[in-house]
Image: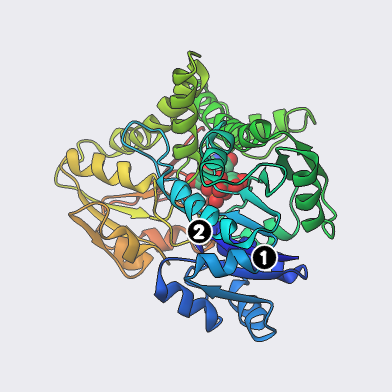
């Protein structure tokens, strides 16, 4: 099938590459000329494992190209995926202006072609957006649903760092369609995938995306709350969750206590769902608690460190890991941000180190010094907070911490093996 994709950010590019790899012909559209040029040279504008080589090959084989011309892309395809960003507004709701703009461009192009075309939203949008915003734009332009066009919603479940693999081998594919014809066109796109396909209505598809992320975030905050009790009574929350997670109704994944969840998805999506619930007159008690627990975890980590070190004022504290998780340079909503702010507020001198995200972090919190290595960050520090579960940190042993002024370590992600630590004072969340 010929497919156009509006927006070549993370989701758009991975979707484009994945669909082209499955044999479709893909045209990616972006308003940013430098991104378009870069894609046409086979160089991904974002970093994601395996993307580079695959994109280069697909461009060479003429299975994927990029353009700034939406009309041309739409006219030369049967389906268009909207993959533009839906950033958070001040109040936590999502800003749908890019979706609106993309819909207008698609509608204009479709009015000229006169051929049946399916418009499918992949951007994360609150329930009701596809039928309440995208469809009216099409109809106002003069297109008739079912006759001139079909409508769908096909959420993404991609994790940064393993996005391409998540796309090619998903746990499930969710297709929401306005009618049978839209559903069957979208189904055809995924016919070569072995994963289960859920075909449903559009609002249910929109909701599946939010509920998935909200439930995963809830598991993390739940584990974090349980970790606090474990710390009080001398139990180990990781051992507890190992035991609990063996129940197949629960499952062990996403029950790792630590300094909380960050990234561009969980905090934003939970906030958007909270906002949406309130707007619908539903009190989001659980979701509010999920956010509250998450906001407190980095502060709790700082409290634990202060408990070990005494007053933090004037002390040099190293934060190891600035990215929101390992294997990415993304610092959006990273727990290192509130952690650094809290340390600075208490008068500490903060030094940060990350194997990949240092540059991105530099604009986030002023007055944080950046170190070029673990050793540089630790040398002369009075305390160390581990914020990201980078592989590089797992191999740190007691001697690595001996360059500190006082070897005091708070492990916020359970990365170290403290067995045999004799001179290092070590504590971790949830034990
Ligand atoms: C998340 C979801 O996992 C994807 O399925 C979803 O498609 C994506 O959001 C999205 O909505 O686009 P991502 O944000 O890339 O993916 O990262 P995750 O690997 O899910 O981690 C999120 C955060 O939770 C990280 O800060 C991580 O350290 C934290 N986390 C994760 C925990 O604190 N404990 C855990 O047990 C697991």
Mark 1 sits near ligand 1, with its Cβ under 8 Å away: no
Residue 90: image quadrant is: top left
Q: Left or right of 44: which side holds 180?
A: right
User: What kind of element bears circle 1?
Assistant: loop
Report the front residue among 123 and 108: 108
Estimate how packed mark 2 is, as few (under 14), some (14 to 19) or many (20 or more) residues with alpha carbons within 10 Å.
many
Residue at image coords 64%, 43%: 144
Mark closer to the observer (2, 1): 1
Residue at the disc numbered 2? 390
From the image, which quarter does the N terminus lie in?
A: bottom right
Task: Count numbered badges in the picture.
Answer: 2
Q: Residue at x 67, y 41 (%)?
A: 145
Determine the CA span between mark 2 and mark 1. 42 Å
Reading the chain from its start, which is encountered first: label 2 or label 1?
1
Q: Quadrant of ligand 1?
A: top right
- Quadrant in the picture for residue 343: top left
Question: Which of 208/310 is in front?
Answer: 208
Q: Image point 78% across, 52% down: which residue? A: 185
Q: Position of residue 129 (x, y in %)?
A: 53, 36
Residue 258's label in the rendered image is none
Q: Specify few, some or many for label 1: CA neighbours under 10 Å numbering under 14, 14-19, or 20 or more.
A: some
Mark yes or no: residue 124 visible. Answer: yes
Q: Is residue 308 above or below residue 185?
A: above
Which residue, given by chain and number where applicable, does mark 1 sit on? 77
The image position of residue 132, as x and y in percent, is: 54, 33
Res 241 → quadrant = top right
């Amino acid at each position: 099938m010929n497919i156009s994709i509006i927006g070549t950010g993370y989701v758009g590019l991975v979707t484009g590459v994945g669909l082209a790899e499955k044999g479709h012909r893909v045209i990616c559209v972006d308003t940013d000329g430098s991104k378009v040029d870069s894609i046409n040279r086979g160089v991904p504008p974002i970093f994601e494992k395996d993307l580079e080589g695959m994109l280069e090959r697909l461009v060479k084989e003429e299975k994927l190209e990029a353009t700034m011309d939406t009309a041309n892309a739409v006219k030369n395809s049967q389906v268009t995926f909207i993959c533009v960003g839906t950033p958070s507004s001040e109040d936590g709701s999502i800003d749908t202006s890019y979706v609106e703009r993309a819909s207008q461009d698609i509608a204009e192009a479709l009015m000229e072609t006169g051929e049946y075309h399916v418009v499918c939203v992949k951007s994360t949008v609150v329930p009701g957006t596809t039928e309440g915003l995208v469809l009216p734009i099409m109809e106002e332009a003069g297109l008739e649903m079912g006759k001139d066009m079909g409508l769908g919603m096909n959420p993404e479940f991609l994790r940064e760092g393993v996005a391409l693999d998540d796309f090619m081998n998903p746990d499930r594919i969710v297709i929401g369609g306005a009618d049978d014809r839209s559903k069957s066109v979208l189904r055809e796109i995924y016919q070569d995938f072995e994963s289960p396909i859920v075909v449903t209505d559009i609002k249910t598809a929109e909701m599946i995306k939010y509920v998935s992320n909200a439930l995963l975030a809830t598991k993390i905050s739940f584990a974090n709350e349980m970790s606090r009790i474990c710390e009080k009574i001398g139990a180990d929350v990781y051992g507890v969750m190992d035991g609990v997670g063996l129940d197949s109704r629960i499952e062990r994944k996403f029950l790792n206590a630590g300094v909380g969840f960050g990234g561009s998805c969980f905090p934003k999506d939970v906030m958007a769902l909270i906002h949406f619930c309130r707007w619908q007159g539903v009190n989001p008690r659980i979701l509010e608690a999920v956010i509250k627990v998450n906001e407190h975890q980095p502060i709790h980590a700082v409290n634990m460190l202060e408990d070990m070190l005494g007053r933090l004022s004037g002390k040099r504290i190293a934060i190891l890991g600035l990215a929101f998780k390992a294997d990415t340079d993304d610092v959006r909503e990273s727990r290192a941000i509130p952690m650094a702010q809290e340390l600075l507020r208490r008068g500490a001198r903060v030094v940060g180190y990350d194997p990949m995200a240092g540059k991105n972090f530099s604009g986030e919190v002023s007055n944080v010094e950046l170190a070029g290595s673990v050793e540089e960050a630790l040398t002369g520090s009075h305390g160390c907070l581990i914020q990201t579960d980078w592989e590089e940190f797992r191999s740190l042993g007691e001697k690595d911490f001996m360059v500190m002024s006082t070897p005091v370590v708070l492990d916020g992600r359970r990365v170290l093996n403290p067995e045999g630590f004799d001179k290092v004072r070590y504590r971790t969340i949830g034990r």
